């Protein structure tokens, strides 16, 4: 069990790991021990694939909302449907919310929990690699607006996170690979030893112990940063590494790229920007090699123009009146928050786009 206290009045988060195969009852213990009769929000694919495991929880739930995990549905309309469903179920301020799904369902489910009746207790049960290593921790909730990522949201850390790597048994390869992009990001920010563990991963048949080690390391790096800056007024912005270009690419591709694929490309592009400012010249190639090894894309097609990207950058949450704060990887464990003015961006972005189009 890991415990994280935040530098605000928010409740601490405890992270538990468990196996679903050998300890079926753990799941039930978790949703009983103080979490009886929760309002459940579940990814529809997870519900389909894990129905028998989920049945007891569903049977005892105060209410249920099942949603398809598609970026085009991560919006205020779906959020208001969840609120309606909570209202129809007649839940109260003491009804806990349990969200079971990947980063998408966790983001919107956590937002519903943090806003309905001004906030309900929250447990997250991540079911994708990306969510286990990153999205479940740190309290960012959100929905997209007009094609731009996570424009509306809150900071609402879950009180409890239950990580069961067994859920990964049914995760499609492409989604597993997406999770690796966030792992590469975390390794670059704060723990190079993760790189060695990543090299041992056989995507076709990943070793659970190795995966669990990686999850622990990623959670430690992210938890350590977020604990000092929950509301992202300073160093937490480092966790946006890969995401300025990544979010723009994700939007520009109309979500044909997964979040992880876009972040991987973002890491590459942002490493190139760092090189133009004195960063390690070998880093873009090292990142490209890691992405390739994981079967992640290392280039985009021509549908993405510099103009479209610039428009999407304008909607990035790190944008200020006169430019943007970028998290740039100068080297392993040397990522720096760097302000770039519009002029500086204009100079550097064409070469970054060229790098991504090779
Ligand atoms: N809050 C944060 O800090 C944070 C961090 C990173 C990403 N995110 C958000 O997370 C989202 C991406 O999340 P994701 O990569 O976890 O993907 P996802 O939640 O979009 O799920 C991807 C696909 O996997 C399916 N799926 C989920 N679990 C499964 C399982 N166990 N077996 C089979 N299929 C399964 C889903 O139905 C979906 O089709 C983005 O919206 C991104 O903005 C949030």
Image (tube, rainbow, N blue to C red):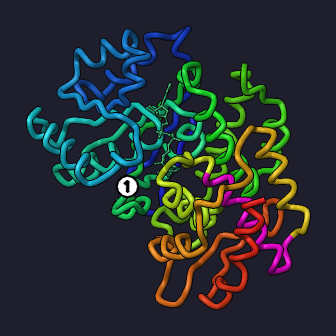
Q: Residue at x 73, y 70 (%)?
A: 352
Q: Nearer the viewer, residue 43 or 161?
A: 43
Q: Among all residues in the image, which is located at the extreme right?
A: 282
Q: Could you tell me which residue is drawn at 48 percent across and 34 percent down?
A: 126
| Relative image position of residue 154 (x, y in whole percent) | 35, 59
Say left or right for 56 vs 16: left
The stretch drawn in magenta includes residue 289: no
| Any part of residue 308 in sight | yes
Q: For disc 1, does the CB lie below 8 Å from ligand 1?
A: yes
Secondary structure category for the residue under label 1? loop
Q: Which residues are magenta?
A: 262-279
Q: Is residue 16 left or right of residue 273?
A: left
Is residue 197 positioned above or below 343 on the image?
Answer: above
Res 174 → quadrant: top right
Is 349 or 12 nearer to us in this picture?
349
214 horizontally vs 289: left or right: left
Q: Main structural element of the magenta stretch: helix, strand or loop? A: helix
In the rendered image, the quadrant that contains the C terminus is bottom right
Specify the farthest residue to the front.
Answer: 302
Residue 210's place in the image compared with 83, above or below, is above
**Residue behind mark 1:** 142
Q: Quadrant of the N terminus?
A: top right
Q: For the point 83% across and 65% down, which residue is it?
A: 331
């Amino acid at each position: 069990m890991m415990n994280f206290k935040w530098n605000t009045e928010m409740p601490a988060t405890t992270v538990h790991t468990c196996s679903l195969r050998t300890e079926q009852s753990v799941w039930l213990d978790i949703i009983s021990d103080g979490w009886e009769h929760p309002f459940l929000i579940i990814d529809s694919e997870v519900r389909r694939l894990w129905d028998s495991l989920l049945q007891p929880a569903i049977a005892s739930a105060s209410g249920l909302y099942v949603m398809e995990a598609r970026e085009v549905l991560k919006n205020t309309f779906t959020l208001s449907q969840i609120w309606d469903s909570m209202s129809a179920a007649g839940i109260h301020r003491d009804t806990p919310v349990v969200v079971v799904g990947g980063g998408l369902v966790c983001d919107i489910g956590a937002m519903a929990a943090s806003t309905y009746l001004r906030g309900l207790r929250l447990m997250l049960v991540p079911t994708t690699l990306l969510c286990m290593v990153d999205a479940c921790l740190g309290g960012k909730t959100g929905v997209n607006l007009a094609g731009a990522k996570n424009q509306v949201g809150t900071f609402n850390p879950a009180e409890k996170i239950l990580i069961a790597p067994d859920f990964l048994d049914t995760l499609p390869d492409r989604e597993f690979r997406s999770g690796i992009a966030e792992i590469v990001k975390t390794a670059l920010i704060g723990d190079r030893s993760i790189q060695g563990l990543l090299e041992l991963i056989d995507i076709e048949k990943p070793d659970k112990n190795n995966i669990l080690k990686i999850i622990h390391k990623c959670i430690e790096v992210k938890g350590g940063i977020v604990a000092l800056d929950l509301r992202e007024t300073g160093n937490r912005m480092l966790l946006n590494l890969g995401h300025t270009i990544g979010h723009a690419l994700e939007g520009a591709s109309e979500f044909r790229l997964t979040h992880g694929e876009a972040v991987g490309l973002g890491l590459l592009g942002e490493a190139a920007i760092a090189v133009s400012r004195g960063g390690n010249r070998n880093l873009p190639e090292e990142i490209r090699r890691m992405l390739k090894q994981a079967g992640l894309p290392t280039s985009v097609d021509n549908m993405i123009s510099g103009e479209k990207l610039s428009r999407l950058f304008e909607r990035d949450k790190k944008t200020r009146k006169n430019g943007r704060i970028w998290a740039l990887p100068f080297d392993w464990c040397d990522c720096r928050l760097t302000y770039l003015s519009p002029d500086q961006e204009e100079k550097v972005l064409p070469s970054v786009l060229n790098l991504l189009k090779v």
